[in-house]
Structure formats: structure tokens, C-alpha cells
């Protein structure tokens, strides 16, 4: 009695049994948890970790600022550090023009070719 109908029924039963087990022989809820953990791990590896590294480097740069350092603010103002205070920095942007800026707004040193 190996008619095509019986073969199709046997294949359907095997597929249903395979669907109950899921990936790696785990039940479907464990598969979902495993996939969520894998997605979070990949996201941490490619997005969160590099951002944390960049923030640490920026904090290190801000702490290493001293008189005479060239800096660029978040607003794009280029200047030279005139004085470093607890939470602010006085930047000289032109002769006889100095501004006081929060340390958190110092973003980077200017590119090599810029004054």
C-alpha cells in the first residue's frame, strides 16, 4: 500500500515531528531564547563595544588637555587651550578673544593640516 497518498502522509508526519523539536533538538521556546541571546551578542559586538571604546578615548583626551593644546568644540570652534579648570576650559580663539567651554563640549584635536 505504498501509494503516493501514504508517502505524502508519512512525510507530513515526519515534518510535524521535526517541527516539535526545532533547532538543535530543543523545544521552540528554547530556540527563541537562544536566538535572542545570539542577536544581543552580535549587537553588543558590533555596536555597543566600539561606542564604549570611543567614549573612553574621548574621556582620556579631555583629561589630557593642557595649556597650549589645540582643540575643536562640538560647535566647530577651533582654538588653543588657555586655562584648564575643574569642569570648564578657557579657549583662546583669536587674539584678545577667549571663551569658556564645558569640558564635555571638547570633541577632538584639529586635523594635522589645520591651524
Image (cartoon, rainbow, N blue to C red):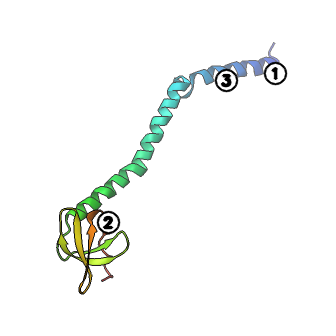
Residue located at (38% from left, 71% from top): 75
State the image coordinates of residue 91 (x, y, percent, origin top left).
24, 75
CB under 8 Å between discs 1 and 2:
no
Badge 1 crowding class, 10 Å Cα cut-off, few under 14, some 14 to 19, many 20 or more, is few
Mark 3 or 2, nearer chain start: 3
Mark 1 or 2, nearer chain start: 1
Where's the N terminus, which quadrant? Answer: top right
| Residue 38 vs residue 78, the one in the foreground | 78
List the residue tagged with mark 1. 4
Secondary structure of the residue carrying tag 2 is helix
Secondary structure of the residue carrying tag 3 is helix
Mark 1 or 3, nearer chain start: 1
State the image coordinates of residue 76 (x, y, percent, origin top left).
37, 74
Badge 3 crowding class, 10 Å Cα cut-off, few under 14, some 14 to 19, many 20 or more, is few
List the residue tagged with mark 2. 105
List the residue tagged with mark 3. 15
Amino acid at each position: 500500500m505504498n501509494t503516493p497518498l501514504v508517502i505524502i502522509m508519512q512525510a507530513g508526519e515526519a515534518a510535524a515531528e521535526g517541527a516539535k523539536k526545532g533547532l538543535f533538538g530543543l523545544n521552540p521556546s528554547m530556540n527563541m531564547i537562544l536566538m535572542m541571546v545570539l542577536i544581543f551578542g552580535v549587537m553588543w559586538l558590533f555596536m555597543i563595544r566600539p561606542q564604549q571604546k570611543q567614549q573612553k578615548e574621548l574621556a582620556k583626551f579631555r583629561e589630557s588637555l593642557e595649556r597650549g593644546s589645540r582643540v575643536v568644540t562640538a560647535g566647530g570652534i577651533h582654538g588653543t587651550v588657555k586655562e584648564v579648570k575643574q569642569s570648564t576650559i578657557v579657549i583662546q580663539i583669536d587674539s584678545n578673544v577667549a571663551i569658556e567651554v564645558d569640558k564635555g563640549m571638547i570633541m577632538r584635536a584639529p586635523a594635522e593640516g589645520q591651524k
